[in-house]
Amino acid sequence: MPSRKKLAAVTLVTAVLGVGVGVAYDPYLLVRAQFERQRLNAGLDHGDVVVAGHRWVYAVADDAPRGAATIVMLHGFTGSKENWYPLADRLRGRYRMLVPDLPGWGESERKADADYGFVAQSERVADFIRAMSPGKPVVLLGHSMGGGIAALVAARHPGLVAKVGLLNAAGVRFNENQFGLDVLAGKNPFGVDDAASLQRYIDIVFHREAAKPWIPWPASRGLIARRKDDAAFEQAVLERIGRGPEQFLPGQEAANIRQPALLLWGRQDAVIDPSALALYAAQMPQARAVLVDDAGHMALMEQPREVADAVVALIERQ
């Protein structure tokens, strides 16, 4: 009869071989493992719920004091809930936080031929807030595309949103830059189909070299394969939010936002030019404007401490 030590050794070897085979079959498992580590380090739990006809996967922090504000965080185009983890880590223990993958993105459900533009997503987010924070308005934060969605939710459903923060938000006609010209020309400047385009994508969205993620092989191979699979979906969404009639709708409807608000941009944003901040501010005179130095489009990841300070100031503002 084999000893316990031998059985333990066999079990360990089997587990290691299983992981190795799994990674060889799907190297994106390494990306998921890194995301899981980041979630745990930020003190977040994992949940899922069916709302608005979609299964949502979200991270959640429920360890805040009784009566604390609930923050809902919306990621941007080609982004995911994981983009918010550095900020969530700095807000942990103070507020309840709900950080979903928007329908169609990340681990949440995507349906063929469904509309994932600003308007459709804003209605889904409104339903998500009703389901996850019944009877209690939330602090709604949105980054990039998520900022455009957040603006529409705050404008159209004021009873659901107590305060709103738009970070490097899409939805206005900003000063011309290469990213905007590429979008208008029908391209996807965020498109990834090989190692060179993956690095170009990282270089566009991040300004600080120290903040740029290092993605080793074979995780990079898994991420590239996933982004290639998503190429048609990304183009379809970009058609709606970057070139279609909804393109500037968030900025137009921002004039209807009456809640206390935060407008925050990275000074070196090469995606949504910082001139967009002034355009939103003209529609939202009550908003506090913050321009973060040494940060690009991913200010929430490049300078999370400064962003956290601005978010706390918004929430604690009377």
Image (spheres, rainbow, N blue to C red):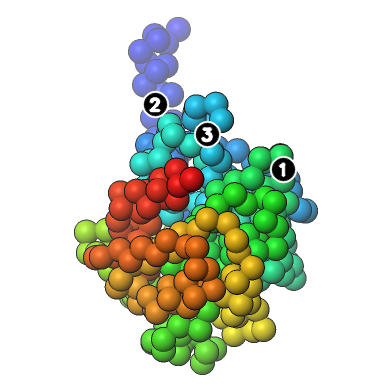
Above or below for 151 versus 184: above
Residue annotated with mark 1: 131
Horizontal side, residue 49 vs residue 142: left or right = right
How far across and down, in percent of the image, does residue 57 sit?
Answer: 61, 46
Report helix, strand or loop for mark 3. Answer: loop
In front: label 2 or label 1: 1
Residue annotated with mark 3: 68
The structure residue drawn at horizontal position 64% and vertical position 45%, both measured from the top left corner, is 137
The structure residue drawn at horizontal position 67% and vertical position 50%, both measured from the top left corner, is 160
The structure residue drawn at horizontal position 65% and vertical position 64%, both measured from the top left corner, is 155
Q: Are marks 2 and 1 in contact (CB under 8 Å)?
A: no
Crowd around label 3: few <14 · some 14–19 · many ≥20 (10 Å): some
Crowd around label 2: few <14 · some 14–19 · many ≥20 (10 Å): few
Determine the image quadrant of residue 236: bottom right
- Distance Cα–Cα, label 3 vs label 1: 18 Å
Determine the image quadrant of residue 199: bottom left
Above or below for 188 versus 79: below
Label 2 or label 3, whichever comes before in sequence order: 2
The structure residue drawn at horizontal position 48% and vertical position 37%, both measured from the top left corner, is 95
User: Quarter of the image containing the N terminus?
Assistant: top left
Determine the image quadrant of residue 69: top right
- Identity, as a three-letter code, of the amino acid under mark 1: Ala
The answer to whether residue 26 is seen in the rendering is no
Horizontal side, residue 317 vs residue 239: left or right = left
Q: Which residue is most to the left?
A: 210
The answer to whether residue 169 is seen in the rendering is yes
Residue annotated with mark 2: 12
